[in-house]
Structures are given as C-alpha cells and as structure tokens.
Image (cartoon, helix red, strand yellow):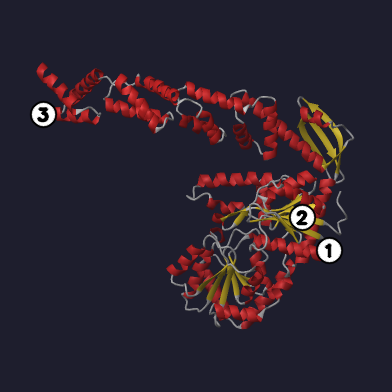
Amino acid sequence: MPKEAFSMRIGLFTDTYTPDINGVVTSIVTLKNALEAQGHNVFVITNQPSILSTTYEDGVLRLPGLELKFLYGYVMSSPLHIQAMSVIEEMDLDVLHVHSEFGVGMFARLVAKNLHLPLVSTYHTTYEDYTHYVNLLGLKSVDQLSKKAIAKMSRMFTKQAQVIISPSDKTKKMLLGYDIRKEIAVIPTGLDLTRFATRNEERIQEIRESYHLGSQPTFVYIGRLAKEKSIDVVIDAFAALLKRNVEAKLLIVGGGPSDKDLLHQAQKIGIQDSVIFVGPVDANDVVNFYHVSDAFISASLTETQGLTYIEALACGLCVFARPDKPLEGIIVDGETGYLFESSEEFADKAQHLLQSDKDLLEQFKSNALQKASTFDSSKFADSVLTVYQRAIDTYFGRYVVTGIERVGEEVFIDFESKDSDERMVIDQYVFDRRGIEVGRELSRNELNEIEDDQAIYEAYQLALSRIGIKDYTSFEMSEYLHKKLELTQEQVDIVIELLKRRRFIDDDRYFRDKVDYHREQMRGNQRIVEDLRKRGFEADRILSALEDEDYDDYTERGVRRAETFMKTLRDGSSRQRESKLRQHLQRQGYGFEVINDIVGRLIKDEFDETDEFESLKKVMEKSTARYARKYDARETRNRVVRHALSRGYDYDMIARVLEEYENED
C-alpha cells in the first residue's frame, strides 16, 4: 500500500533525459527539482547509447539502449530489463510516472504490472504531426492510415494508466478524439523562474561578440530543427523584414534533421549573413541566448504546450508566434507578443516593435514576466502531486460487487465504490475462473485484470474460429489478433501459448507439412523459403531443412514440373518454348543453376525438331493468310518471315518451309 502523501517515492520513466536538450527533458528536470524541493524522493529511469551497460548513480538508472542516427540520436531501449527490475523494486516506489510511449515507456508499464503499482502517463508528443516521416509521398490514404494507427497506439499505451496528464487543452481534445476513456488532467509544464531571471552579463557579452551581433536588434529561435517546427516559415518571415531595410539578426539555436535544408534556404534567398545557425548548445547555456536577444520567434503549430515560448516570456522577451490552441491566453497579441499568419504580417509587427521607443519593449517585458509567473515550478509540482494521489486512490480503491445477472453466456456485474457505480460485462468462463460473488471486494487493479482476462478469452475464441477455417502458425495468428483486436503483446502471447498447449497450433508440424506440400506441388526451394518466411519461420531453419534433400532428387522434381508445363505449350519455336519454360521455373522458385540443368535434360527429350517444323508451318500459314489480305506476294512473304523470326524460329528452318511451299505451288 502507498505511504503518506507528504513524502512520496516517485519513479520518472523516460526515453530522453540529460544531456539531451528538448522540451520533454526540460519538463522532467523541472518536475524532478520541484518535487525534491518539497521533500519527495524522485528516481529517474532512462536509457543510454550502450547496448550492454546498465548504470545507477545519484538516483538515475540508465538502461542499455541503441542510438538511432537516422532519428537524430534518439536512443531506443528494449522493454525487457530483468536486472533493472530488481533495482527498481528496491526503490520502493509509490507511483510510476511515464513520459514516453516506446522503449522505457513500455518497460514502465511492465514494471507497474509486475510490482502492482499505480501509473500516471504524460502525453508529451502529438504523433499526428510527425506522420510526414513515414508518408514521404504525402499520400492522403497513407496519412489517414497513419492517424488511425496513432489513435489505436495511444489507446493501448494509456490503457494501463490511472490518470493521464495533458500539457494543454489541445492535446486533451485530441486524446478524447482517440476515444480514450481515462481521466485526463490538463497540467502545463512549469518553469524554475529563478533560473531564467538571472542574467550572466559576461557570457551574454561573449555571445554577442562571438556572433558579431553588435547593437543590431536580435531575434532568436530555440528548439529542434525539423520539418514539423516550421522554421522555414520563420526564415521567410525574417527575410520579409530585411527587405524593408531593417537591420536585424536571427539566431537559430538547436540541431536536427532539417539543419542543412534551412541553411540552404537562407543562402538561396540571400540572407545568410543575417541568419546565424548556432547549433546545439549546453542546456545551462540556453538561457543566455534568450537574454542576448530582443524577441523570440517560432512558427510551430505542433506543440503540446510550447515550453520555449514560456521560457522566452520568463526572460522578459516579446514573443512572435502563429495562432495555435496551446498558446491561447499565453501569447496575447499586443500584450505579451505578436501573432502573425503571413510573412508580411510579421514584418509589419516586427518593424513597429523595433521602430517604437524603449517604453514598448519595457511594457512587453513586464507583461511577459507577469504571464510567466503563473507557470512557477512549485505550482506545477503541486498539480502533479494531486494527480499522483488520485492515481494511488484509484488504483488501491475498493469496489464491492452489488449485483450479478446472467444472460446466456454473458454475465453482467454491478460494482459500487465511494465515488462511482460501474457495470462490467464478461464471459461466463472468465466469471467462473475469478470466483466472483455478491459482497466481494475488489481493487481497481483487480477489475483491470478481469478486463484483461476477458480480452484474452475473446481473442482465444476468435483464434479458434479462424483455425477452424485454416491452419495458422504462431506468427500468423499473432499478426491476425493484433490486426483485429487491441491487445498487448503479452495478452497475444498468452493466447498463442494456450493454442499451442491444446495443440491447435503446432509450428513444427505446420513447417513439415508445408515443406512436403510445396515439394508435392513440384516447387523450387526459393519459393518454399519465401512462403515460409512470410509465415514467421527463420531463414536459417528453412534452409537447414531444405539442404537435407539430395540435389539429384531436387533436380528430378524440377524436371517433373517442367514436363507438366511443357504439355501446355502446343506450339512455338524451341527457343520460345525454352524461354517460357525458364520463366515458369523461376516463378516456381528454382535457381539459375538448377534451371540450366533441367532445361539441358529436357532439350533432348522435349524439343523435337519435327514438332518444331510442324509448329512453324502452322505459324507461317496463319500469318500468310493474315498478311495476304493487305499486301502483295513479295511484301506478304517478307512480313511472314519477320513474324516467324520474332517468334524465335531459326532462319534455315523458315527457308525450308518457304521452299516446301514453293515446291507445292
């Protein structure tokens, strides 16, 4: 059971943490510091770019991971860490707070289940805004499928959480649109305001000198350089300002997959001397780039909250942004910044700001600091702690069975708790297995387990109905169940194990039967390998089984296939028939060397010259009748010869047929 709320032991699970620089890391570090300042014990479980190393130091457990260069250094971690599980158990956590959906996020859900702990999930990323990474051609159908997959994934990843934290109303609305039926608490990420209020004048001067900023007004963008951040819009807008003979600099701080494209854009429109690409900087140095600037600009429409906007306000900057739901009430046009929808509108408002007296900048600074004060990290921590307590109460809350009604194979169960009444429908099998009766008390966790049992039972029944139609391998059935139902991999594995135990699925038997079937159909090994790999078998296993066959027996099978096919070739030149035979054998999975051996054996037996001569006569008779209607005798003869040659017949044989016709005439 949980300890008293005033001193919690909290585990923050995340795929990204320091030294990474991004909004998620900022949010987690801010939360950790604020919680610890209130006396709570906070542990971070994350990963590192080492596939063998697990380290635990200063309350941070780093799991083995693999750095994905093509995803700009994102570290992917396995959801299984047996050694780490015992370390986490010793942390004696009260609540788990997961900040990512994959890798470490999946591991967090496994930890919550195995250690019977409540789970809170923060939904940091609007994955809908990242579908362009898989939809390279911009196809509407691919985009629709991607968004359906995201909705399904989101339901699956949030299913185990007691409460979901959304950084903005925009994100909450999106989650509700995914049909997520969990409690969703909107809690904007807080800031350590003291960090942004402190100015390091020496470092600020160094930056000004290093980038030759002089006394020119300076705009800054800070964040990841990626397509979804719309930095190209920022560069175009800044170019519109410079065209008005306004002297200014734009600092672009950060790195990402679009850095080269953006540099090329600035060069192409001729403003490369005014746009400075700083690259990634140390997290502790970021605040100095805010302070060296006069205004912050971003055109992103994909933020769940827009943390960099709030950081800019905390530094007293005027913020330029495009209108977006998460920014409503934060960036107020003419008060804390300016909203723009086009390059010219930005240029108008930026020019007005720069050409006004200092009083306007001071007014923006005062408004910005006042707005940022509402995002104080201690208030952020208080809101999150309230959610933690609610998650604990929900998880360990008690439900009393107040009624049971049987209708056919289904059982309707009524539950009552101090906060709500619920009704659940489960199968008779699951009901009997759980031994549920009126008056029994169940925890929320036990109710979730009953729902999981029901999902497994329904999946098992669906699997049986499919196996009644055709045989399945474990892999095929797993794919089918994932496609038809929203199940975790663990639930699918349980169904597969039940099917195996009861001999409804036998991969070894299936493998042997399939190999025998393909051989009976006289197919080649390449076709067998291709088919079995699609059904989930490893290539090494397939090749090992096929190598047992004697080469002469294999060739003989190919000869039988070739002989059967040759019977369908009633006419055509030997060359033409040989070409068709080779193509057929290749489609049936025979390799080049085996095909040569097969054809070499058949040429002597099947490609009889007399048959070919008679076939040629038929071809030439048909073409003569066709061409004679349109052309004179000489042209008809030439066209007939060309037609016969195109069909692969030898010229000498064609000449013999012509000579035979002339002798008959």
The front one of 541 and 25 is 541
- Tell me the amino acid under the disc marked 3: Arg
Residue at numbered disc 3: 634
**Tag 2 near tag 1, CB within 8 Å:** no
- Residue 368 can be seen, yes or no: yes
Structural crowding at the residue carrying mark 2, measured as other residues with C-alpha within 10 Å and reported as few (<14), some (14–19) or many (≥20): many
Residue at numbered disc 2: 11
The front one of 329 and 471 is 471
Name the residue at 79% across, 32% down. Answer: 412
Mark 3 / mark 2, whichever is N-terminal: 2
In the image, 240: left or right of 664?
Answer: right
The front one of 159 and 57 is 57
Structural crowding at the residue carrying mark 1, measured as other residues with C-alpha within 10 Å and reported as few (<14), some (14–19) or many (≥20): few
- Tell me the amino acid under the disc marked 1: Gly
Quarter of the image that includes the C terminus: top left
Residue at numbered disc 1: 39
The percent position of residue 126, horizontal first and vertical second, equals 62, 54
Q: Secondary structure at mark 3?
A: helix
